[in-house]
Image (cartoon, rainbow, N blue to C red):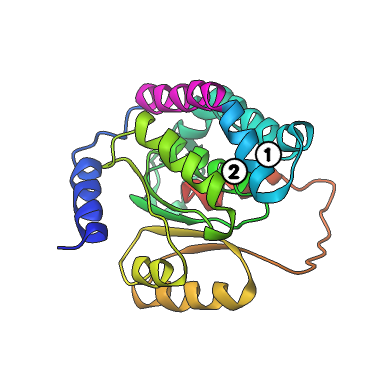
Amino acid sequence: MNEIELCLSEMQAFFQNGNTLSIAWRKEQLKKLKDGIRSYEKQILNALYEDLGKTDFEGFASELGIVYTELDEHLKHLDAWAAKQRVRSSLLSFPSKSYTIAQPLGIVLIMSPWNYPFQLTIVPLISAIAAGNCVILKPSRYSSHTALVIEEMLSKLFYSNHVATFQGGAEMNQELLKHRYDHIFFTGSPQVGKLVMESAARHITPVTLELGGKSPVIVASDADIGLAARRIIWGK
């Protein structure tokens, strides 16, 4: 059994035992992550400078600050997002009461890009942890300093059967995509995004693809952006 298979096997056992279901436990993991980022803040900023030439100000404004905001938002709203939601029953089930219940998906693969290597790795991780999932992270090899700091930090914060990081280039991407996940979150080029979707389709795995290029959208004034995001992450 190779390293990826062993990691997936341990994560499946950890998840199936119900370890991630407690909302209180998920909050503890988010708080642990926030404290860990604060303790690694200087190393993260130094790595962002080495990889991309970002000053401390730019690194905080475009990466760390956004991550802290996401952590605070998830800690503030997690109880409401995870709560049982009353919905209208159909006439066929009258008299009855109906609800939707948010359930974690299982194991999530997050593949992040080089241009915002900390933010676009950790923000999806925050949502995945908050929703009660186990996570395999694959940072970009083109931002190697940041990727190594992320791996070191997360290995100290989380057990590998909950959050694990794999390093490497295209070969590692291909190896990771051979396996089945419960969701794949990919940020990168359309060319690689097609390969991710093709691999996911073999297992009928849902994907979130944030691909490069100009993608103009029209957002109506009454659109509930938060609800749309929760439907993607929470499957609601």
Residue for badge 1: 63
Q: Is residue 32 magenta?
A: yes
User: Is label 2 in a helix, a strand or a loop?
Assistant: loop
Is 84 or 131 nearer to us in this picture? 131
**Identity of the amino acid at label 1?**
Glu
Over which residues does the magenta segment extend?
Answer: 23-40
Give the left or right position of residue 106, taking residue 47 as reference.
left
Query: At 39% from the left edge and 26% from the top edge, which residue is drawn?
Result: 23
Q: How many marks?
A: 2
Figure quadrant of residue 192: bottom right
Q: Is residue 55 magenta?
A: no
Residue 72: give x, y in percent of width and height.
60, 24
Cα gap from disc 2 to disc 1, whole angstroms: 6 Å
Asked if residue 20 lies left or right of residue 142, the reply is left
Q: Is residue 131 visible?
A: yes
Q: Quadrant of the N terminus?
A: bottom left
Q: Main secondary structure of the magenta part?
A: helix
Q: Secondary structure at mark 1?
A: helix
Type of amino acid under label 2 = Phe
Q: What residue sits right under mark 2 in the picture?
A: 118
